[in-house]
């Protein structure tokens, strides 16, 4: 805006006569000397400003009345630099000798100055248009606002309230007070979800990080099923340690709220598999640049699994940043391809195919320690967060960028996939793979 008002000031000072017309209404308008034709609002979610001006050519009378600024006077040469600068700022030609006007009005100094003003105006207009475009993009890019949610035990509104509650705790990096409140709140929420009090565990450990040793805590909710074979649902609850205020509504709170809601659903029904819902700590790197910095909780958890437990795990699903109101879940390259196929097929069947994109994306997240242990794991992440990813790891990651519907979509797709696994409605190779306990044999082969 300052640019526009500055242009207005310069134009007014120049005593230019010009006309402008609104590009939308087409109404022409003409203003007298020293008046600035301004705005016409409309277009893409922003204010659009267009002015087309025609300066009156300088004539001899005007030239004599308002001579152009002259060069730096000789007695100023020996002045102090600051005083010189002052003089030059008050002189639009910065001390250069002004040429007298020629007969061609567009080459006169007034016209050049007018041209500069016009260019600045156009630049301002471009900035406003790109801002409008970005806003429109944010609203329309794969927004889940219009998605139809089928009836489901997954209560996305309840999950979203949890998301708001966790984000309201503020930044929650390991070692902070808010972090400790977070895992206590997770514990209470899991009990409230109906998980037996004896089946909720804190798995605390000291993590060696680039900023020193920090105590971290995974929270594990075990929901026993008819069979000992296990399915693990995971996600992280910590937020990235940053100098700015970063509340991680999507990156931290959405996975936390989602897993608590999954606990609600799974604890209220009889399951074939045993489910472990694991809220990982220390997913975020504490200091960027080191390969071993991050995934502290999931690495600790995977390392502490016994060989027998690894053999029992049939699948691991990790969720991260799934609260994004513009959902883009890509095929993740490290993930188990058969389980990914299952997820993508169910997403198509439920009518949410447009949010599950075939273009592969490679992400180092909490599923990786499981992948490396030979456990079939799938990463569900909407990493493309905001235009040019500007909401990711920035103070823009707030509740307003998230949506209950997005949580609802991922919840329905994952529940459908779990139902397929439980009932054996899976593609034949996957079923054989699950029944044979191939995870264990892969794990043995990898060691
Ligand atoms: Zn993150």
Image (cartoon, rainbow, N blue to C red):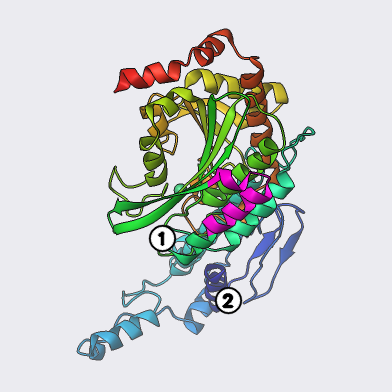
Task: Judge depth for marks 1 and 2 and give the one in front.
Answer: 1
The residue nearer to you, when weighing 174 against 38, is 174
Residue 185 left/right relative to 85: right
Magenta-highlighted stretch: main secondary structure?
Answer: helix
The residue nearer to you, when weighing 290 against 302, is 302
Q: Give residue 229's position: percent from left, percent from top.
A: 54, 24
Determine which residue is flagged by label 1: 242
Disc number for residue 404:
none
Q: Which residues are magenta?
A: 182-200
Q: Quadrant of the N terminus?
A: bottom right
The residue drawn where x is 29% and y is 88% is 83
At mark 2, the secondary structure is: helix
Q: Assess mark 2: CB under 8 A from ligand 1?
A: no
Q: Is residue 171 magenta?
A: no
Q: From this viewpoint, which residue is outermost toward the front? A: 198
The residue drawn where x is 44% and y is 38% is 366
The residue drawn where x is 47% and y is 63% is 116
> Would you say the residues marked 1 and 2 are in contact, meaning their CB atoms lie under 8 Å apart?
no
Please tell me in which quadrant of the rendered image residue 39 appears: bottom right
Disc number for residue 12:
2
């Amino acid at each position: 805006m300052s640019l526009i008002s500055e242009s207005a000031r310069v134009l007014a000072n120049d005593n230019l006569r010009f006309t402008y017309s609104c590009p939308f209404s087409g109404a022409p308008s003409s203003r007298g000397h020293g008046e600035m034709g301004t705005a016409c609002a409309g277009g893409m979610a922003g204010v659009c400003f267009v002015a087309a001006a025609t300066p009156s050519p300088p004539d001899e009378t005007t030239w004599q009345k308002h001579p152009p600024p002259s060069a730096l006077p000789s007695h100023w040469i020996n002045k102090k630099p600051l005083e010189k600068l002052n003089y030059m700022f008050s002189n639009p030609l910065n001390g250069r000798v002004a040429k007298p006007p020629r007969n061609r009005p567009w080459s006169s100094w007034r016209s050049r100055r007018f041209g500069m003003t016009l260019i600045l105006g156009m630049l301002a207009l471009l900035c406003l248009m790109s801002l409008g475009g970005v806003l429109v993009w944010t609203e329309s890019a794969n927004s889940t606002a219009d998605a139809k949610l089928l009836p489901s035990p997954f209560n996305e509104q309840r999950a979203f309230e949890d998301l708001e509650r966790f984000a309201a705790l503020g930044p929650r990096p390991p070692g902070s007070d808010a972090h400790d409140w977070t895992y206590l709140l997770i514990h209470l929420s899991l009990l409230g979800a109906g998980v037996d009090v004896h089946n909720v565990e804190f798995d605390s450990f000291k993590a060696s990080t680039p900023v020193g040793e920090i105590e971290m805590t995974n929270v594990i909710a075990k929901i026993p099923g008819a069979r000992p074979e296990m399915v693990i649902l995971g996600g992280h609850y910590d937020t990235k340690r940053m100098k700015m205020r970063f509340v991680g509504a999507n990156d931290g709170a959405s996975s936390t709220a989602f897993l608590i809601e999954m606990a609600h659903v799974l604890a209220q029904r009889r399951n074939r598999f045993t489910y472990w819902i694991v809220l990982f700590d220390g997913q975020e790197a504490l200091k960027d640049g080191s390969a071993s910095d991050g995934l502290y909780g999931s690495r600790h958890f995977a390392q502490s699994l016994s060989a027998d437990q690894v053999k029992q795990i049939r699948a691991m699903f990790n969720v991260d940043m799934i609260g994004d109101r513009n959902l883009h879940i890509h095929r993740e390259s490290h993930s188990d391809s058969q389980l990914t196929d299952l997820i993508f097929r169910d997403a198509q069947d439920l009518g949410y195919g447009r949010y599950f994109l075939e273009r592969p994306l490679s992400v180092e997240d909490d599923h990786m320690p499981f992948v490396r242990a030979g456990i079939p794991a799938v990463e569900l992440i909407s990493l493309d967060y905001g235009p040019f990813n500007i909401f990711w790891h920035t103070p823009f990651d707030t509740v307003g960028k998230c949506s209950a519907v997005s949580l609802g979509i991922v919840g329905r797709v994952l529940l459908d996939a779990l139902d397929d696994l439980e009932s054996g409605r899976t593609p034949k190779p996957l079923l054989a793979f699950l029944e044979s306990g191939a995870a264990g044999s892969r794990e043995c082969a990898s060691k």
